[in-house]
Image (cartoon, grey):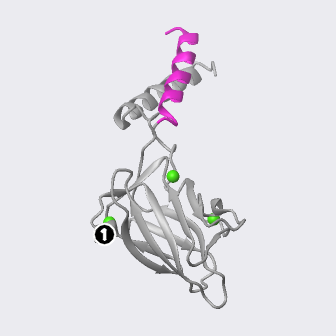
Amino acid sequence: MNTNFLKILSVVMLALSGGLCWGVSSPWADSVVSFDPPDGSSPSAALGEQDGLFVSVNAPKVLILAFDDNRVYNGPGDDLWIYEATNCDAVVEVRARAFDGPCTLLGVVTNSGGFDLADAGLDYVDFIRFVGLENSGECPGYDLDAVLGLNSIDRNPACSIPAPAAVLLTSLGTLAVTTLRRRKML
Ligand SMILES: [Ca+2]
Ligand SMILES: [Ca+2]
Ligand SMILES: [Ca+2]
């Protein structure tokens, strides 16, 4: 087989298979919808992975976050995990909804904790809403660090190649690279 063709084939296949369907979404909350009333702090501290940075959801503030590149669905056990940063015993109410569904109460949480969507009769959610219920004596409010979808699926529209096809592309791309290396062309 022509060497240049093999080089192009391997690059194209590996590019198509890597990144389109795997590893493109994060199971964490992605964006702030609203934080009301604003107080000058940055609610984006509650986005992405748990990192120790937080936003205080003081009673009666309301913070709404969205999952943009993923959806949280009702799988085995807890489906959402809420990370609180300081164990300060403040209390926050947690509600969630799908983009086409009602805002539904999941419960209240003090410090870090999880919720099972089955308990609220929900199949999946795209938004999560926090309402400060009770401040603690030591902290101004619930110190929200991060929100994780324990059961999360990719919703990236760019993911157009199903997993079996991606596996095939990866295999073919790897085979092409191996062939080139055996020919000592790479
Ligand atoms: Ca995400
Ligand atoms: Ca569940
Ligand atoms: Ca954080």
Q: Is residue 145 left or right of residue 149?
A: right
Measuring from the top left, give residue 53's x and y in whole percent: 68, 68
Height in image: 72 above or below 9?
below
**Residue flagged by tag 1: what amino acid is it?**
Ala
Ligand 3 in which quarter: bottom right
Does the stretch in magenta take in 13?
Answer: yes
Residue at x 64% of width, y 59% of height: 44
Measuring from the top left, give residue 159's x and y in whole percent: 44, 35
Question: What count of labels does the image hold?
Answer: 1
Q: Which residue is mark 1?
A: 120
Does the stretch in magenta take in 111?
Answer: no
Q: Secondary structure at mark 1?
A: helix
Residue at x 67% of width, y 89% of height: 138
Q: Which residues are magenta?
A: 1-20
Height in image: 89 above or below 3?
below
Give the position of the C terminus as an image quadrant. Answer: top right
Q: Nearer the viewer, residue 88 or 3?
A: 88
Measuring from the top left, give residue 102's x and y in whole percent: 34, 59
Question: What is the chief secondary structure element of the magenta stretch?
Answer: helix
Residue at x 39% of width, y 30% of height: 168
Question: Furthest residue to the top?
Answer: 2
Residue at x 63% of width, y 80% of height: 86
Measuring from the top left, give residue 41's x and y in whole percent: 70, 66
Q: Nearer the viewer, residue 75 or 177?
A: 75
